[in-house]
Structure formats: C-alpha cells, structure tokens
C-alpha cells in the first residue's frame, strides 16, 4: 500500500491500569488556499537538482521580478505577493508537489500554519484531535508529531478502542477520505 505522505499525531494514553496509543493523520485536500505567492516565498527555496532545473529557473526569474517590484514600489509588492497565487499552482494543484519547498511540505504543521483559520482540513483535524482526547481526563496524554518520511509509529490499540475512536471521529464531521486514512494508519497494527 502506498502511504500518503503527511504528518500525523501519535497520541498515547496511560492510566494506572492500561496504556494505549493511536495515530491521527492530517489529510490535505489540496484546495490551494495556502498556496499564495507570499506562502511560496516564506516556504524556502527550491533545491536545484538536474530533475527540477525548469522549476528552479522559473523561481529564479520570479525572485528577480519581485526584487525589482520591491525596489520600485514596496506597498505594491506587499499587495501583489499576498493576492497572487503561487506560480506553481495549476488547477488548484501543486505542479511541483514532489519537490515543493520544505515550508510547503511541512504546512500546516508549523507554528504559523497551526494558527491558520483558512485551512478547512486543519480545522477538521483539530476537532478530530480534541475528540480523541475527550473523555480521557483521568489519563496521562502524550502528543507527538511525526512525518511519514520516517517509519510509521506502531499503535497499541484494540479493535474495541479503534471502534470507539472512529465513532468519536464520525461525530466531528470527518470526511470519508480522512476516515479511510485513519484506518490505514491504525488498523494494520490493532492488538487483540
Ligand atoms: S489550505 Fe490546507 S487543505 Fe488546502 S492545500 Fe493548504 S494544507 Fe491543504
Ligand atoms: S510550491 Fe506548491 S505547495 Fe508550495 S505554495 Fe506553491 S503550489 Fe503551494
């Protein structure tokens, strides 16, 4: 199975008598809302490689044009970068997804990104996280963030606990694709 490249929260719960854990993945809906020129500029530069020379050249030309605009008219520059889509956004999809800058790769799992109100997938994700933690007040909860570039953390979760989690998630308005991904991140590791 090809695992979706994304970040996920690994939640661990501990009570005096039991211990269990679950993974909650974030699923980007690729809506393009976070892909303005401003977002691209703060995301970091593209690393030049033989495979992305065209994209790198396009970025270089862009930096030079924006540098000129900044020198001529800084306020026009500010308006331009915050109101213009990223030049690599095509039909609401990132045309350089595999080689996108590190900041784009990490978003919204960044201090700034987690504050954004514009990402509907992130708003749903935060509700899902709260729902999984709700009702666990007598337990110790540990919450850590990870990326799928590393081997997926295994979970300690029974079928019954998995069902409880999916019931809670369904009440948050989780989408079908998000629930499928949640299943992919947890079900193969269920304990008896
Ligand atoms: S706003 Fe959120 S869902 Fe939309 S492309 Fe950005 S990270 Fe993905
Ligand atoms: S490089 Fe891709 S992910 Fe990054 S802002 Fe541009 S379109 Fe969005």
Image: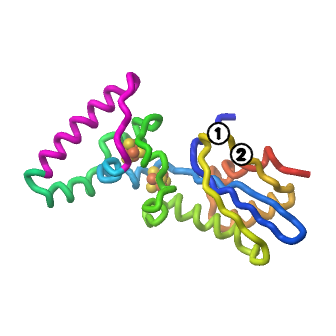
Characterize the magenta stretch by its predominant secondary structure.
Answer: helix
* Residue matched to label 2: 184
Q: Earlier in the sequence, mark 2 or mark 1?
A: 1
- Residue 3 at what x, y percent from top left? 64, 39
Query: Which residue lies at the image location 64% right of the left edge and 65% below the top edge?
Result: 129
Query: Which residue lies at the image location 30% right of the left edge and 42% below the top edge?
Result: 87
Query: Which residue lies at the image location 66% right of the left edge and 48% below the top edge?
Result: 181
Visible residue check, residue 92: no
- Residue 115 at what x, y percent from top left? 46, 66
Residue 1 appears left or right of 32: right
> Magenta residues?
43-70
Marks 2/1: CA–CA distance? 8 Å
* Residue matched to label 1: 3
Asked if the residue at label 2 sits under 8 Å from ligand 1, the reply is no
CB contact under 8 Å: marks 2 and 1: yes
Residue 97 appears left or right of 157: left
Helix, strand or loop for disc 1: loop
* Mark 2 Cα shell of 10 Å, populated few (<14), some (14-19), many (≥20): some
Query: Which residue lies at the image location 70% right of the left edge and 69% below the top edge?
Result: 133
Q: Nearer the viewer, residue 151 or 29?
A: 151
* Mark 1 Cα shell of 10 Å, populated few (<14), some (14-19), many (≥20): few
Visible residue check, residue 41: yes
Q: Nearer the viewer, residue 131 or 136?
A: 136
Q: Is residue 61 magenta?
A: yes
Q: Is residue 173 above or below residue 176?
A: below
- Residue 116 at what x, y percent from top left? 44, 64
């Amino acid at each position: 199975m090809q695992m979706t490249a994304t970040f996920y929260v690994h939640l661990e719960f501990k009570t005096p008598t039991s211990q269990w854990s679950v993974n909650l993945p974030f699923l980007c809906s690729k809506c393009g809302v976070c892909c303005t020129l401003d977002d691209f500029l703060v995301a970091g530069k593209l690393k030049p490689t033989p495979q992305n020379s065209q994209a790198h050249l396009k970025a270089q030309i862009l930096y030079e044009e924006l540098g000129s605009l900044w020198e001529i008219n800084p306020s026009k520059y500010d308006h331009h970068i915050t109101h213009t889509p990223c030049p690599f956004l095509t039909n609401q999809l990132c045309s350089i997804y595999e080689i996108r800058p590190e900041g784009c790769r990490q978003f919204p799992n960044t201090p700034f990104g987690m504050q954004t109100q514009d990402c509907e997938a992130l708003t749903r994700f935060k509700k899902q996280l709260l729902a999984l933690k709700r009702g666990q007040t007598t337990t110790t909860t540990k919450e850590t963030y990870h990326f799928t570039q590393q081997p997926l953390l295994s979970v300690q979760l029974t079928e019954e606990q998995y069902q409880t989690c999916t019931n809670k998630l369904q009440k948050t308005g989780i989408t079908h694709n998000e629930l499928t991904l949640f299943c992919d991140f947890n079900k193969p590791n269920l304990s008896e």
